[in-house]
Image: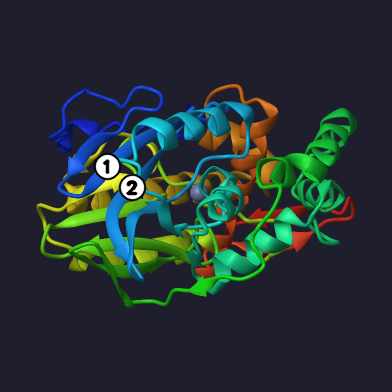
Amino acid sequence: MNRPMNPQERELDYPLGERLPAPAELVDAAPGVRWLRMPLPFALDHIHLWLLRDCFEGREGWTLVDCGIAAPETRALWRQIEAESLAGLPIVRILCTHMHPDHLGLAAELGERHQAPLWMTLGEYAMGRILSATLPGTGGEASAAHFRQHGLTDAATLEQMRARGDRHFSQLVPAVVTRYRRIHADETIAIGSGRWRVIIGHGHSPEHAALYEAEQRLLISGDMVLPRISTNVSVQPFEPDADPVNDYLASLRRFETCAADTLVLPSHGRPFRGLHTRLRQQHEHHEARLQETLEACRERPMSAMDLLPVLFRRPLDLHQSSFAIGEAIAHLHALLTRGQVRRSCDADGVFRFTAP
Ligand SMILES: [Zn+2]
């Protein structure tokens, strides 16, 4: 796992037990909601997807929430699922919670095969298309400049990041459909017999959509609420002044309207109960990281790179490092917004943050 593990995971309940869906297996998570698991070739090695029995515009079938990355193994598992496990019915609609590759990757291919429209928020759809097309300013050069400005000066690492940044997203999301159906904050979407309310989240991605069904007390939380790892909140090269930590914590408040005994269906980690406990843990986690960041900035001016050993007390690979630097910048920016640190750009072109 590349993310900090939740030390208070025991405060949560896992009512479905230890069981995880085997490759290409569908497990009932709730009435009308089937759970499947796709592999990922990263430290975070899986994503959970949801198939909801539906009748959409007169067509019997399944609404699919999130898709998996575009990779041979995922494609092969999808072919197997389509042949064996969908009761002969098509996917009639695809809803992506957000544009990250593990969620959006295969949406275009599956949508074309099943004639299923893509439903997403505008922010996620637009950013997904921009990154999939590797438009100017989104490639590896922009990432390298961003990391350089935050204290990563090792030439070899920068070169690796340049190379990786040019192909990473578009390999995993080779295409995004050219037409979509926009979904909105607080819109209620009828799926089968359920009525799912859209809860928008910020900080992890531009306009993340989670889905809450009040009658069954089910929450498809996407990446906004995860039981075991903390949601990644990173400053991205294309929005260098962003403050995703405060954005994330503010949007977590919207989940407080969900019932206390809600069954949370997360993209990573097992379905769990204890939503309000997990929301509190996430607030506490970030406030503790902010406190550590502030204390480090009191001792000496800190770049995001200087902060890595403070926030992440273990070695990181390249994939993890880019997440980690983004997250370190995010915590520095949160303190900047709160007026607790000052930022200066030094003669070496590196941003450093100082607490008075
Ligand atoms: Zn994500």
| Discs 2, 1 touching: Cβ within 8 Å | yes
For the C terminus, the quadrant is bottom right
Q: Position of residue 94 (x, y in %)?
A: 45, 57
Residue 34: numbered disc: 1
The image quadrant that residue 251 belongs to is bottom left
Q: Mark 2 points at which residue?
A: 51
Q: What residue do we see at 86% from left, 61% from top?
A: 136
Q: Above or below — where is 79 with respect to 49?
A: above
Q: Identify the amino acid type marked 1.
A: Arg
| Residue 240 appears in view | no
Q: Above or below — where is 264 with respect to 229?
A: below
- Answer with left or right where residue 28 lies relative to residue 80: left
Q: Where is residue 32 in the image (x, y as percent from the top left)?
A: 20, 50
Secondary structure state at the residue bearing disc 2: strand
Q: What residue do we see at 50% from left, 73% from top?
A: 181
The mark nearer the N terminus, 2 or 1, is 1
Secondary structure state at the residue bearing disc 1: strand
Mark 2 vs ligand 1: CB below 8 Å: no
| Residue 171 appears in view | yes
Q: How many marks?
A: 2
Q: What residue do we see at 55% from left, 51% from top?
A: 107
